[in-house]
Amino acid sequence: MGCVPIGLDDTVTADRTTACGDVCSPSATIGLHDLAYIGPCRAAELAPDGFADGHLTGPSSCDPAAHPIATLTDVASYHATVDPTRSTMTLDAGDHIDASLAGRIAFDFDVPLSLTSPYWIFFENLQLESQGDVQVRVFEANDVYGGIDANAMAFRSSGVLPVRWRDAYGPHGINPQSATGWHGQLDLAARTMVIDLSGADPSDESYTFVMHVEAVVDDLPPVADAGGDPTLPCTSPSGTPVVLDASASRDPDPGDAITHIQWFQLGPIPISHDTSTTVNLGVGTSYFEVHVYDRALGAGYLMKKVTITSSASCP
């Protein structure tokens, strides 16, 4: 699993295969964190003329047989698709450009939504493209985040969203900023998200940008379920076999399903990619994590504790 690098076309099989191979198989040329990453690319690569060329790709999947080799902590849990009939942008930077917007948004929360405030919403990836004659791209590949009101589900962020475009005179770009940042509203029950941004380039305030985005949250995270936290008597001095079973895990989206599972024990390398696996445990308490992923690479996980007690077989 992985992302297609900037400048590559994610519809071209060779590009997709290469990108997936870099993430799904061990390599001495990239770090463990890169190997573990699923989803959007982290940053735009500059073209020779200095313009951030290509486009940021949304979460994409690889060959299901190519299991990731490390924990995929950076994959977003939620994904949304922008509605181009309701999403607009206005750019004043030499030329006046009005256009609709389309694209994808991947986001997450730092704590479960059921907990009380305060907490944060993290945009793992936001990628928008104008639908006009002059193609304008709005993107953020690194995390931008904002505080979210647990009651109103309203959020506000001071993160900068780079804006890049090309016209007959070549490549251009600004980083709109404002005192109020950008803000929005999220309704998971209705599966809707609204984001508004207005700002100017600090180096030239005549360069302004206004954006209104309405999106449908079309991928909710799967729910990891591995049963309770059992306490079992030791059956042998050489270890007690315990079955870890996540078969009760499920996905809330109609027609979606869990496609990948990872089990971990105190480390970044998975001990199993199977729905259920058997581990041999000594007396004491052991901790495990199970990560589950759906077709759109929404992610969920939970911690599981297993306690083995002394017994007549293991005094």
Image (cartoon, grey):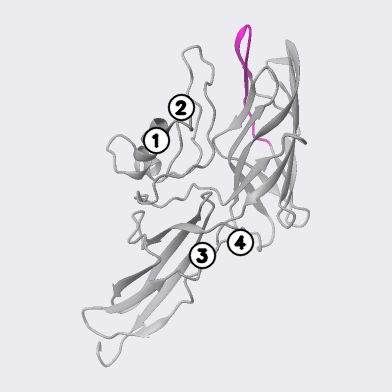
Dot 4 or dot 3: first in sequence order is: 3
Q: Residue at x 25, y 90 (%)?
A: 313
Residue 187 point in image, percent of width and height: 74, 52
CA gap between label 4 and label 3 equals 11 Å
Q: Neighbour class for label 2 at 10 Å: few (<14), some, many (≥20)?
A: some
Q: Amino acid at mark 2?
A: Leu
Q: Neighbour class for label 3 at 10 Å: few (<14), some, many (≥20)?
A: many
Residue 197 point in image, percent of width and height: 74, 32
Q: Is residue 57 above or below residue 300?
A: above
Dot 1 or dot 2: first in sequence order is: 2
Q: Foreground residue, 131 or 154?
A: 131
Q: Is residue 11 above or below residue 38?
A: above
Q: Foreground residue, 258 or 78?
A: 258
Residue 211 shows up from this direction: no
CA gap between label 1 and label 2 equals 9 Å
| Mark 3 lies on residue | 224
- SS type, badge 3: loop
Residue 182 point in image, percent of width and height: 72, 36
Asked if the residue at tag 4 contacts the one at tag 1, i.e. Cβ–Cβ closer than 8 Å, the answer is no
Q: Looking at the figure, which quarter contains the N terminus?
A: top left
CA gap between label 2 and label 3 equals 34 Å
- SS type, badge 4: loop
Dot 4 or dot 2: first in sequence order is: 2
Q: Which residues are magenta?
A: 158-173
Q: Neighbour class for label 1 at 10 Å: few (<14), some, many (≥20)?
A: some
Q: Amino acid at mark 4?
A: Pro
Residue 205 point in image, percent of width and height: 74, 16
Asked if the residue at tag 2 contacts the one at tag 1, i.e. Cβ–Cβ closer than 8 Å, the answer is yes
| Mark 1 lies on residue | 19
CA gap between label 1 and label 4 equals 29 Å
